[in-house]
Image (spheres, rainbow, N blue to C red):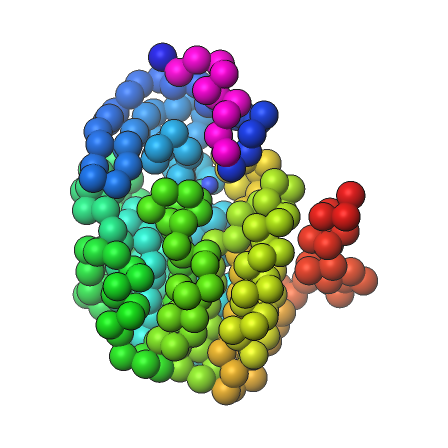
Amino acid sequence: KTSKVQYYNNPMWPGEAHSLKVEKILYQGKSPYQEILVFESSTYGNVLVLDGIVQLTDKDECAYQEMVTHLPLCSIPSPKNVLVVGGGDGGVLREIARHDSVETIDICEIDQLVIDVCKEFFPNLSMGFKDPRVRLHVGDAVDFLRNSTEGKYDAIVVDSSDPIGPAQALVEKPFIQTIARALKPGGVLCNLAESMWLHTHLIQDMLSICHQTFKGGVHYAWTSVPTYPSGVIGFLLCAKEGQPVNFLTPVNPIEKIQGATKAGKELRFYNSEEKPKESVSKSQKIQILLNN
Ligand code: PUT
């Protein structure tokens, strides 16, 4: 029923739209935070949509979940306590569970309905909740982190929706500082950082906040997710000063973790292979795009 004008009016990507053919609507509802839609598509399996924005599809979710998780967790020697902010579909939990050094996985998701709907329609992701190390906290991550013990976590993964609506605060300086406080020295953050094609100013602001807050190093990474606007999504990888962290060469390669990628549990997208040396850094590329 949405008119064409509405299609092109999303403030995150004005003038653009991407469409998927709907075979069947599986669920439509409204939580106190957002509108939730699940449909079966012709080409990408089941699709989760929040407030009109595609969050994941069965077909390409691996490219997001594996990268947002293993980029940070493979960059530190032995992650033990990990926090997921958002991530109510369970996909990041599924990926963290591959790491046998991990002892506790806290997840703070604001919307119980997202969790319930994903348990029904995305069993390959929500299986992550079955891991006995997972402790679910339903509530606002800003409050959760404010009340959490200083220096508790080895890694924090922010798997939110885009920074409009409930996730707006998650890209702002006070929240980033609260995250830094909750990390151990040498702990790492992976925060959703949108598309370099669409959100260069937002990324530049986030880079600047992260550089001010994290003295152990900040990198911009990205992955290809065809059903996200512009087909890519980025991450900010940040390290708290303490132990040296090298995001470019995984010190904890997933392939070396016993059973992490065994038959039936293979990774579909991520591997630890080092990228060829590049003459222009990712941050420089963002600057080049911004100047054009
Ligand atoms: N959890 C990531 C969602 C991004 C949607 N654009």
Rendering coords of residue 194 (x, y %)? 53, 48
- Between 75 and 182, the one nearer to me in the picture: 182
Rendering coords of residue 90 (x, y %)? 29, 51
Which residue does the image show at 58% across and 25% down from the upper left?
Answer: 15
* Ligand 1 quadrant in view: top left
Which residue does the image show at 42% across and 34% down from the upper left?
Answer: 54
Image check: 197 left or right of 106? Answer: right
Q: State the extent of the magenta-drawn residues as a range.
A: 2-11
Asked if the stretch drawn in magenta spans residue 174, the answer is no
**Could one spot residue 270 in this view of the protein?**
no
Rendering coords of residue 207 (x, y %)? 59, 62
Asked if the stretch drawn in magenta spans residue 5, the answer is yes
Image check: 175 left or right of 110? Answer: right
Which residue does the image show at 36% across and 12% down from the upper left?
Answer: 1
Q: Is residue 88 above or below residue 121?
A: below
- Between 18 and 71, the one nearer to me in the picture: 18
Quarter residue 177 falls in: bottom left
Secondary structure predominantly adopted by residues drawn in magenta: loop
Q: Is residue 131 above or below residue 182?
A: above
Quarter residue 42 falls in: top left
Image check: 200 left or right of 10? Answer: right
Quarter residue 66 falls in: bottom left
Query: Residue placed farthest to the right in the image?
Result: 279
The quarter of the rendered structure image containing the C terminus is top right
Which residue does the image show at 62% across and 56% down from the upper left?
Answer: 204
